[in-house]
Amino acid sequence: MINYLVTGGCGFIGSNFIKFVMSLPNTTVCNVDKLTYAGNPLNLSEFEKNDRYSFYKVDICDKKTLETIFKSKKIDIVVHFAAESHVDRSILSGIEFVKTNVEGTQSLIDVSREYSVEQFIHVSTDEVYGSIDDPGKFSEESELHPNSPYAASKTSSDLMVLAAIRTHKFPAKITRCSNNYGPYQYPEKLIPLMVSNILEGKPLPIYGKGENIRDWIYVGDHCEGIYSVITKGRTGEIYNIGGRSEIKNIDLVHKIADELGVVPNIEFVKDRLAHDERYAIDFSKISKECGWYPKIGLEIGLKNTVSWYENNKKWLDNVKSKEYMTYYKEQYETS
Ligand code: NAD
Ligand code: DAU
């Protein structure tokens, strides 16, 4: 048996990753999640009665409780997703980003060292590199240049992991991925927000002129990329993961509207502060060393995603709670 501890498993990528790991033989998964607004245990309701799965509602900053979990579960591999993950929220207020993303990561490193885990995967982001002009791409050697409080907190957490690797020979690996999309993504992020607004007949808020470029990756490809790093990646290394699907926001929103068969009601709104112009990923290292490459192109991935949201309106309504409405108002309805 390989015993995984996954943090943030009730969020978007974490819940997709747990489904992936639970489909493998001889694995157990212990999911540690604080259940912030972004965490939804219903994403994993199919495992409620599975004795290979356990769930603990815990803040990763709470070292004492983490210690009791690590002790009883005999953890082999930690996969660390838990984070405050939304750039716009970090612009409204940064403190929770520092607490969870920086302090929480250090707390998890400390307990993982105490219980001598075999492997620690730190799930990071291409946003640590900042923005890059065409035709450049970020490599693992690119300069760290975070521009938002979210990106700065993720960069800080990467540096804490790298420091543990260098100082304590901590058996960690870091992955840095581009923009994910797919089932179970909270509708504060571009793709599910646009789908949700179209389904509700609301306008589609696009920041600035919609010319910013992101490299989109289907969440299943990201999960397989992380798994390839676990099984084939070298300890102490950083691996970029990208989708080979660069597109301007405005063009992406048109594609989503086409998929739903509507003419988009676009509203150009005030630009995001320090809005990164373009992300583009060179993922040749993970391809060469781990044999991984993205399999799902944007056309198929978007089709799957849009139809998942259409078929899961209940899930969508359920997560658009009071908190979501308050956030939506603050972000989009005040000038
Ligand atoms: P998400 O916001 O959907 O989920 C975050 C999860 O972490 C939630 O379940 C939340 O309850 C939990 N959490 C938050 N604070 C916690 C705490 N203090 N203790 C325990 N649990 C806590 O995020 P996501 O989009 O799934 O991203 C997961 C990870 O992947 C993050 O580390 C993010 O930086 C990274 N990442 C995301 C993307 C993307 O496009 N979404 C791309 C690259 C990297
Ligand atoms: O690149 C990886 C990162 O991708 C992850 O580290 C983050 O956790 C994840 O949230 C995502 O960050 P972005 O800021 O790129 O994603 P978001 O979906 O918020 O925005 C994508 C683009 O769309 C960005 O250029 C801003 C724009 N946008 C977003 C929203 C929510 C709009 O124009 N309007 C919107 O309402």
Image (spheres, rainbow, N blue to C red):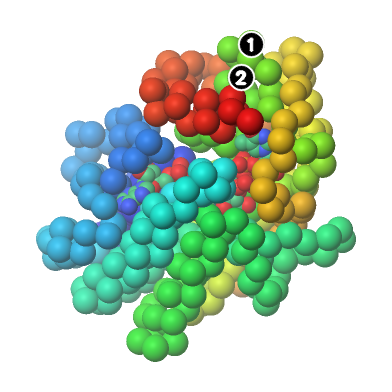
| Vertical relation: 44 (above or below) 100 | above
Expressed as whole percent of the image width and height from the top left, the position of residue 244 reads: 74, 51
Left or right of 190 in this view: 55: left
Marking on residue 197: 2
- Note whether 258 is above or below 49 in the view shown: above
Q: Quadrant of the N terminus?
A: bottom left
* Amino acid found under the numbered disc labelled 1: Gly
Residue 261 appears left or right of 52: right
Marks 2 & 1, CB-CB < 8 Å contact: yes
Toward which corner of the image does residue 189 lie, by quadrant? top right
**Residue under label 1:** 201
Residue 3, image x, y percentages: 27, 59
Q: Is mark 2 within 8 Å of ligand 2?
A: no
Quadrant including the C terminus: top right
Q: Residue at x 67, y 48 (%)?
A: 273
Q: Is residue 22 above or below residue 241?
A: above
- Classify mark 1 as within 8 Å of ligand 2 or not, answering yes or no: no
Q: CA distance from mark 2 to mark 1?
A: 6 Å
